[in-house]
Image (cartoon, rainbow, N blue to C red):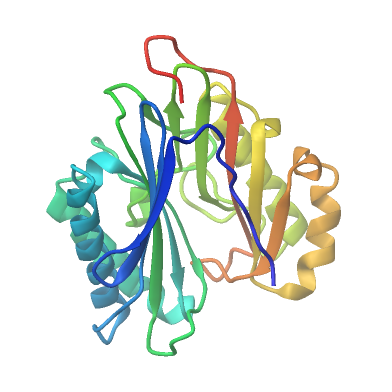
Amino acid sequence: MALEAWHIGGMLGKRRRAEQGGTVVEALRAHYRLFLAGKGEFSAPDSCGQMREEFRWLDRIAALQGGAVPDLVHRTWIYCRDIDNNYRGLVEGRNGCFDRYGLTPESHFIASTGIEGCTELPGRLLHMDSLGIAGLEPGQVRYMEAPDYLSPTHVYRVAFERGVRIVYGDRSHYFLSGTASIDAEGNIVHPGDVVGQTARTLENMSALMERSGGCLSDLKQAVVYLRDWADRETVRNRLMDSPLAAVPHVMLKAPVCRPGWLVEIDGIAVNGAGEPAFAPL
């Protein structure tokens, strides 16, 4: 068992409440309201239907927060039981919801990690946690790209952003989506080589951060997902020679969406690259 904890100081208040079959936690700041939402029920029999249910529930939560999902939700974590068989339904369901919102590669999608994971209910094939922020002004949300290192996701017919940067008056928060060993054409780099894939994943993450005014050492936490748990010491040794050696991180057995990917990493970074035109966090 591993536990991650995100501590937020300077809150005016915190609320946790049940909302129509799920849970919402709100952190109130002077200028912003952060909320973390997770649905607790399902009825659809397949992953596509359950993905649509997740977003329909999130639609209601966003409305209670005074907005809509595309405007308020900036990061999701999606856990998929038996990802090799159920990921296609996840993608179809999410793509359909984004079509309904009118989201395109030009308007941008939502940063996300889609990874193997199980709930306590065998029939539940998906669970999604979502982070939203109310009170942001135009220009505070910036999408992270490094197209000369890794392709946009729509190249291989999925829909999520490589990462998102939230710029405040006094800092920036970076939410890196699940990142793997991929090149600018969407191909797997170093197939079958977990050391090479780990190195390329770190290169891709570094490129995303550097193109957005940060660096890999700005990471405050990371999650490392492995398809084969036997690779953990090999990957751990490689990470000890990288900036992640100084970053709190947890390593999990969790296959990635494409069988050829042996490792995936996501994380949250913070630095002081704020802009005074915006209110501080």
Task: Answer with the quarter of the image where residue 56 lies.
Answer: bottom left
Q: Quadrant of the N terminus?
A: bottom right
Q: Is residue 126 above or below residue 36?
A: below
Of the pair 58 and 202, the residue shown nearer to us: 58
In percent of width and height, residue 63 lies at: 17, 50
Of the pair 246 and 189, the residue shown nearer to us: 246
Whether residue 173 sits left or right of residue 32 in the image: it is right
- Specify the farthest residue to the top: 276
In percent of width and height, residue 17 lies at: 35, 61
In percent of width and height, residue 129 lies at: 41, 60
Q: Residue at x 85, y 47 (%)?
A: 240
Q: Residue at x 24, y 56 (%)?
A: 61
Residue 75 visible in the shown view: no
| Total numbered circles | 0
In percent of width and height, residue 265 lies at: 61, 53
Q: Residue at x 33, y 69 (%)?
A: 90
